[in-house]
Amino acid sequence: MKTTPWHARLALTLALLLPVYFAVAALGTKFGLWDWKTGLLTLTMSAGPIVLGAVALFALISLVVTLWRKPRTGWKLALLALLVPVAIVGMLGYIRSEAAQIPPIHDIATDLSDPPRFSDEVLAARQAASANPLNDYQVPLGELEPWRGRAAELAKLSHAEIIAQSYPDLAPLPLGAASPAEGVEAVAAAMREIGLSDVSTDPATGHVEGVAETFWFGFKDDVVVRVGDDRIDFRSVSRVGLSDLGANAARIAELRSKVQQRLDR
């Protein structure tokens, strides 16, 4: 009776635990076991490649040993164990290449000269969370501390210029025949529909606010919408991180579409 080598079984076990490792790193951040820098930067981005490399090396050694020694049992397990970290590295590489095409900003709005402003309550929540500062859209990135020395190719461009170049399809939503009150109601309902929490409205100013939260890491983004007499403007800002990987622009596009659908009924 042929027995599968212990090292091949161990290699496969370690490989199958890799998704668990990354899930724990993310969910631990979400549930407050550690801060986002530990979960994302340390456990995922710094230690993650080391863990992947160690498991891949062990699986490779196991594969070579099983192929070298007769009766060569267990090589399929060792090969599968090797393919798991390789697949994860490939996926992370793809995400990184896609991220490289996205500007490293985290504050997106449809009004580039006068973006919607957050309420004092949201500003207090952002301050309590040590969130990213809200910067003037007209100031070049090179003059702002978070980007100083990090985005040399964008140093001369402001948020307004980068948003206009990178997301040309984002635009205010015409209110049309709807009243501002109907617009506020449509925005609040659309926010809830796409999963935002803590949705609040201020009919007097036409402002609607909500909070978006990512599934894995629990990163929170603040969203504010300003309903005027003839148009609706949107803004979405991440609390932490330098680049939002395009999440805020995508959220605005989705929210804008949902609001438009409700106004067109």
Image (tube, helix red, strand yellow):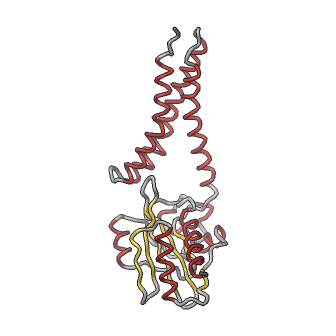
Residue 140: image location, x then y, percent: 56, 71
Q: Specify whether 162 is left or right of 12.
A: right
Measuring 39% from the left and 71% from the top, which residue is drawn there?
A: 198
Identify whether 198 is placed above or below 241.
below
Q: Which of the 4 image quadrants contains residue 173?
A: bottom right
Measuring 60% from the left and 73% from the top, which residue is drawn there?
A: 257
Residue 114: image location, x then y, percent: 53, 82
Measuring 66% from the left and 70% from the top, which residue is drawn there?
A: 165
Identify whether 69 is placed above or below 265.
above
Total residue callouts = 0
Residue 5: image location, x then y, percent: 49, 15
Q: Which of the 4 image quadrants contains residue 211?
A: bottom left
Identify whether 58 is placed above or below 263.
above
Q: Specify whether 147 is left or right of 98.
A: left
Residue 109: image location, x then y, percent: 55, 74
Measuring 57% from the left and 20% from the top, which residue is drawn there?
A: 63
Q: Specify whether 123 is left or right of 91.
A: left
Q: Specify whether 117 is left or right of 173.
A: left
Q: Nearer the viewer, residue 94 or 252?
A: 252
Identify whether 38 is placed above or below 181.
above
Q: Which of the 4 image quadrants contains residue 120?
A: bottom left
Q: Quadrant of the C terminus?
A: bottom right
Residue lying farthest to the front in this orientation: 265
Q: Nearer the viewer, residue 32 or 215?
A: 215
